[in-house]
Amino acid sequence: MNILVIVISVLITVICVLLALLQHYYFINKLYKKPSIKYDVPVFADLIPSEKSKSNRDFPLQALKDYDEDLVLYDLNSALNSQPHQGKSDTIEFIIKNDKATGTDSEVYNTLQAAISFKLSGKNHKALKLFEHAAAIAPENPDVLNKYGEFLEQQHQDIVSADELYFKALTYSPDHKAALINRERTAQVVEGLDYNLFKSIDSKNDYLKKRMKMDSFEAVKKQAYYLHIYHTVGIEGNTMTVEQLRYLVETGQVVSGKSIIEHNEVLGLEKAMQYIKLLVHQDYIGIKEILGIHRRVMGHVDPISSGVFRNENVFVGSHSPPFHEELPGLMDSYVEWLNSEEARSMHPVRYAALAHYKLVDIHPFIDGNGRTSRLIMNLILLKAGYPPVMVLKEQRYFLYIQDVARKSNKNYLSRLLSFGSVFYF
């Protein structure tokens, strides 16, 4: 009898231990395991040449004397050999300032009524000016935003901008009946535009994968790597030419007449792109990786501030990023979203665009936020089997699109993709 009791006690103890271990294993994996995102084969990762192959380029350095940036861009675009984007429109005609309202209620009301009167009488140019003025002095007024959106939709057929304004009106007044009705209609149209754009991009991407196997395009691909660096640092004001930065990267020699900062910006970005190539084969993108990208981008320029979050508040045009005390929590949330099922279920282009938007909006660093955000965007694209995006420095104005698209993530995507940013090979 005593033996039976002992055996039963031992069995119960063993069962309890096993249950405890299973419970511990479940919670550890459920709560602490880093989610693994499945990506497509990163077929375009070799577009970023490795350190060892930099001096082994197929085209000699002196050939860049006859370098023609426009010709390279033409070759890149013509390689797509497909129809232009559907639904492309000039959606950056205006900027709504996010400053606090400066007009009185009476002034806002009178301006809005005058704009509506001009609209009804067919004087659309004057109506547009007044709607712009009303939105500038009362950027949080849902009636102004809604009427402005209706004007753009009806008179300019600018449904993307109109959808943003309806969305913004609902942000400040969720029960605004007219904005609710308008947004329900336009949101579906904008979603359709994005869907058609995705189809076009996917078709071009499939074609590019075939072109990657052709030797005849090899020289253009390699020149495009330097063109990418040129435009990325050029957006920030760097004045080096493509020939000069390539000479710097390949020889390590100083370029006469250029500042130390300009040299360091080029070297830092080149190091960051090498790091991106390593991260392509890593599933998880965390705080460590984001700081690592920034550390390489800014390490040569500002070693003290590189790779660390800002410890002061900053202002970027009309945008006021979150207070620096909020950054740890915001960045944890950003990384959680970046690796979430929600994000990985999106189309890769939408995912990449939103990753860029969200990080720029948080603005976690003193400097280098744009470059870091664009590198993360391209990292996501490379992981998903897409080529990286080259944003031309002439499109710098469009990078401030978040001033208009604030709080409207989907529309940010439509605007970002409609400005002719090209994929490089």
Image (tube, grey):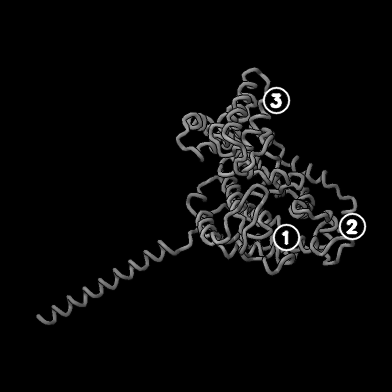
Can you tell which of label 1 and label 3 is closer to the viewer? 3
Residue shown at the point (87%, 54%) measured from the top left: 64
Q: Residues within 10 Å of mark 1 (few under 14, many from 20)?
A: many
Determine the residue positioned at 56% across, 60% down.
Answer: 327
Q: Position of residue 36 (x, y in %)?
A: 50, 58
Q: Earlier in the sequence, mark 3 or mark 2?
A: 2
**What residue is pinned by disc 2?**
62
**Taking the image as drawn, is residue 210 in sight?**
no
Inspect the image, locate mark 3, and give the three-letter code of the amino acid beneath it: His
Tell me if label 2 and label 1 are in contact, CB under 8 Å. no
Dot 2, how many residues are within 10 Å of its Cα: few (below 14), some (14-19), or many (20+)?
A: few
Q: Residue furthest bottom?
A: 2
Callout 2, which amino acid? Gln
Mark 1 or mark 3: whose residue is earlier in sequence: 3
- Say which of 303 and 201 sits in front: 303
In the displayed structure, 355 sits above or below 186; it is: below
In the rendered image, which residue does mark 1 sit on? 269
Residue 341 location (% of width, % of height): 47, 52
Q: Which mark is residue 125?
A: 3
Disc 3 on helix, strand or loop? Answer: helix
Mark 3: few, some, or many residues within 10 Å (few <14, many ≥20)?
few
Image check: 187 left or right of 26? right
Q: Nearer the viewer, mark 3 or mark 2?
A: 3
Q: How many marks?
A: 3
Q: Residue at x 60, y 49 (%)?
A: 357
Q: Label 1 to label 3, Cα distance in Å?
A: 44 Å
Q: Position of residue 391 (x, y in %)?
A: 71, 47
